[in-house]
Amino acid sequence: MSGFSADWLGLRAGADGRARNAALAARLAGHFAERTGGLRIVDLGAGSGNNMAATAPLLGPAQHWVLADADAGLLARARARAPRGATVELQLTDLACGVGALLRPAPDLVTASAFFDLCGAAWIERFADALAVSGAALYTVLSYDGREVWEPAFAGDAAALSAFHADQRRDKGLGPAMGPDAHDHLARCLAARGYRVEEGPSDWALEAPRDAALIAALAEGSAAAVRPALGRAAGDWWTVRKGAARVVIGHKDLLALPPG
Ligand SMILES: C[S@@+](CC[C@H](N)C(=O)[O-])C[C@H]1O[C@@H](n2cnc3c(N)ncnc32)[C@H](O)[C@@H]1O
């Protein structure tokens, strides 16, 4: 029901893992390193568990994960990937209804991957309010920031990117999506609530042949949005894009620690 297939999430997992910002990951690990008790972690838009799999090794041994998503099939896959020694709780929920119930009892950490760019401005503001009330830290990775470089370049690249960004801003159920602007809005909202915000790049650096399937899937994923903008050049664009040798897709990671 979410429109994110397990195949797509599986295809991007390797690139996501390579792209995660290492300095922020180390800061997260350091923040919780002294903790003696267990950690309660809420993963928003958890999908098939990619974020849990990549984040769990940064945290201590006693972890309880609350995986929230609207797609029961993806959550079932995530359950099968529970980190060794961790407990996992599935919350099948439409996050359009807010996160309040997920943050009671208050978690130590809220996390998300490739999620906040789907959210609208008002949803992000309500989320920041709820997070501040809970006092939890936030670690969110791989928010799309709008930068793209495709090699070889194509004459219609600028028009294609602009059409893709317009499509990114469609309402996906959480208000008109902020797409490339979501990360900065989230950072501002958290800073305004007293959070100490650190950010860093987590760009995908894709290369054929290693990432050829992901490159082709990216081209395919934006084709419907881009074709009307390119008109008769759309066919050539499609041929060049799906066979690209190198692609950089800009993402950002963010760690926000609560006041005090
Ligand atoms: C791009 S996927 C990322 C999945 C996972 N975090 C990862 O990195 O592989 C976005 C996820 O958000 C979930 N999602 C989108 N809108 C949602 C909503 N309104 N309520 C709950 N989950 C939602 C989708 O089902 C999907 O699993």
Image (cartoon, rainbow, N blue to C red):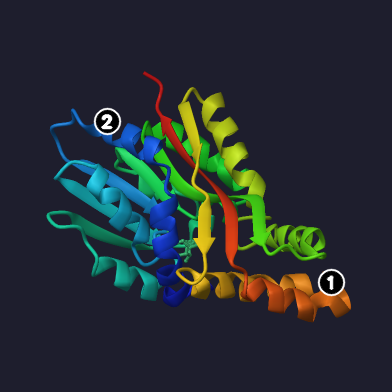
Which structural element holds mark 1?
helix
Foreground mark, 1 or 2, reads 1
Q: How many marks?
A: 2
Depth check: give the residue in front, 10 or 18. 18
Q: Position of residue 45 (x, y in %)?
A: 44, 58
Q: Residue at x 20, y 58 (%)?
A: 83
Question: Can you identify the residue that label 2 sits on?
Answer: 30
Q: Residue at x 23, y 42 (%)?
A: 59
Q: Position of residue 166 (x, y in %)?
A: 75, 59
Kindly report the distance in space between the C-alpha atoms of the residues bearing marks 1 and 2.
48 Å
Is residue 2 something one can see in this rendering? no
Please indicate whether residue 231 sits to the left or right of residue 27 in the image: right
Please indicate whether residue 213 sits to the left or right of residue 105 in the image: right
Which structural element holds mark 2?
helix
Single out the residue that lies furthest toward the right.
232
Give the quadrant of residue 247.
bottom right
Check mark 1 vs ligand 1: CB closer than 8 Å? yes or no. Answer: no
Mark sitting on residue 214:
none
Depth check: give the residue in front, 155 or 134. 155
Give the quadrant of residue 170.
bottom right
Please indicate whether residue 192 sits to the left or right of residue 15 in the image: right
Identify the amino acid type marked 1. Leu
Give the quadrant of residue 103.
top left
Q: Position of residue 195 (x, y in %)?
A: 46, 26
Single out the residue that lies furthest toward the top.
260
Is residue 37 something one can see in this rendering? yes
**Quarter of the figure with the C terminus:** top left
Near mark 2 (Cα within 10 A), the count class, few <14, some 14-19 or many ≥20, is few
Please indicate whether residue 100 sits to the left or right of residue 125 in the image: left
Mark sitting on residue 230:
1
